[in-house]
Image (cartoon, helix red, strand yellow):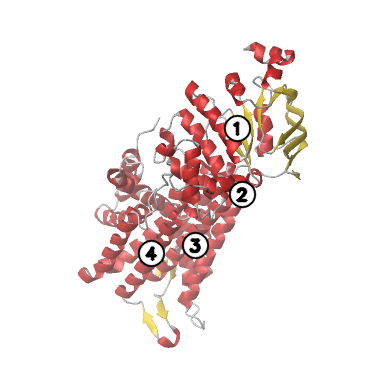
Amino acid sequence: MRLTRVRLDQTDGTLRQPGRPRLLDGEAIAGTGVFLMLAALPAVAGGYPVYILPQYMLFGMLALSLGLLWGFVGVVSFGQAAFFALGAYTMGLAMQQTASPINPAYLGLAASLALGGALAGVIGYFLFSAGVRGAYFVIVTLALSIIVEQLAVSQSQITGGWNGMFIDRMSLTFGPLGEVSLYDDAPIYYVVLAVVAATFALLKWLSRATFGKLLVGIRENEDRLIALGVRTALYKTSAFALSGAIACLAGAFYGTHANFVAPSLAGVLFSTEVVVWVAIGGRGYLLGAFLGGVLVASLANYLSAIIPRYWQLALGVIFVLVIVFLKGGIAGAIAKLLAPRRRSPAR
Amino acid sequence: MTEILRTEQLTKRFQGLLANDGIDFALASGELRCVIGPNGAGKTTFISMISGHLPATAGSIWYRGERITELPVTARVRRGIVRKFQTPSVFDNLTVQENVELGVLASARRARDVRARIARVLELVRLEEAAETLAVNLSHGQRQWLEIGLLLANNAELLLLDEPTAGMTVEETAATGALVRQLIGELDVAAIIIEHDINFIRSLRAPITVLHLGRVLVEGSFDEIERNQEVREVYLGAE
């Protein structure tokens, strides 16, 4: 062991040690509250909200996948919709395997996770190892969206082309213990809620672990972190792979919930919407990204019904206003209001 | 003292410019060495090749008996060679404590005693009172110390300090001198310091290597260097 480490380890106990991290921070507590409210919702509001909210929650999960990348690593991806659509198509193809001895829905979910993680891992490895950063990464991910959309159109014998693909609702099977059908809205609502909440909890935990702290270090000053011996390309690749797996899994659930997937789900327009959700919600906060996905998608749906010709314009104006006046998004503004002021510099 | 670093005929050429021309250099474990010379002498190029930020055109670098000439930056850091840049490079939007924590985590992902090590480093670099301050709000001198703290947290064995007192007040420079002497004395790290501040160099009372036009002009104590006619002509006399 190096002498430096030995000496740095020595402390006589009289030093003022940095504060012990709390088990739950404000965002985790707020997130718990949000998910509890979502869990209580079917008891007070049935019908359309219970039908449509799982889709918005899955958009929120998709936004979480970008929140991990953009908020923690500082890398913007315009390819999240491509992973989302790939997950939905994978689920659709799996659900057609009715002769499978294993529940085809389980096959679809596992294949989506594996496909999203592997594809993003391979792309990330080559890009990040080659030192691709900033706008160049954005362009590659944008191209990914276009490629997946074009593949979905051109491989119409598999995907249904522009007509899209029908996907049946999944059910949960427990071997000899029986089966839970998710054909009704309430059961799938709770399954989606559980998956999204678990994803939020996983990412929240990771953000507080060494992995998350080093990702933040990459965002803040990658060159400094490299000079401290961290192979940042590996961390960025891991984050992108995790992000791709989450987006793909969200797409798989979306496909089986919406019963349909079409090429536009992978398109540049939808990819851009995901970026808008996260920017408005607050890219530095997982809960901001999630709520951005849920609320902005809901708002877009509402606006498209009342002003069908101008809803995208209205959304664009909101986006610009948030970028100009609330650089950290809505969550960032709330956090700024609630957070204690950092101490003035001790000089 | 055992030799920790050796360069043999270390050369760096940038197209037509010969920045380092066959530098032979040796550093002992726990030794502090100052590298001085006029602007363009090749000082920063020299430590950039040692840290791995620049590839050598020719020659070799040996660290604890191992040839490291072709190793990437990260591999050299894992062996204990860490570098402070001319302009302080820290994590501006994180607190001082979070900065040092990254230094610890970068060297030991599963360190159990992170908090104790952070506290020790903050004490060493005299930033305990600023632990909760954002790095961007620190004074220039404090940012320089914070960067040194990052290196210490990172298990440094050989510190490469590029102008650690640049932009500092007289008081901060004096405190930095005391800090460097303390680090060498207490932690048994070796260090190469590039500096232009002759008073700071004098205060360190360390052996000096003078570079000129990419070559080692002379090596010796401060008094020997000060008396050297060639050094007076190319560097000291010019001041």
A219 w.r.t. B217: above or below: below
How much space separates mark 3 and mark 4, taking CA atoms?
13 Å
How much space separates mark 4 and mark 2, taking CA atoms?
31 Å
Give the class, few, some or many, for how many residues have Cα within 10 Å of label 1's Cα (few <14, many ≥20).
Answer: many
For label 4, the residue is A196
Marked residue chain, label 4: A
Give the class, few, some or many, for how many residues have Cα within 10 Å of label 3's Cα (few <14, many ≥20).
Answer: many
Q: In front: mark 4 or mark 1?
A: 1
Q: Position of residue A247 (x, y in %)?
A: 45, 60
Type of amino acid under label 2:
Ser
Specify the farthest residue to the bottom: A176
Q: Nearer the viewer, residue B225 or A151?
A: B225
For label 1, the residue is B161
Q: Position of residue A55 (x, y in %)?
A: 35, 64
Pointers 3 and 4 in contact (C-beta within 8 Å)? no
Type of amino acid under label 3:
Ala
Q: Residue at x 71, y 14 (%)?
A: B227
- Quadrant where the C terminus of chain A is found in the figure: top left
Q: Nearer the viewer, residue A209 or B5?
A: B5
Q: Which mark is residue A129?
A: 2
How much space separates mark 3 and mark 2, taking CA atoms?
20 Å
How much space separates mark 4 and mark 1, taking CA atoms?
48 Å
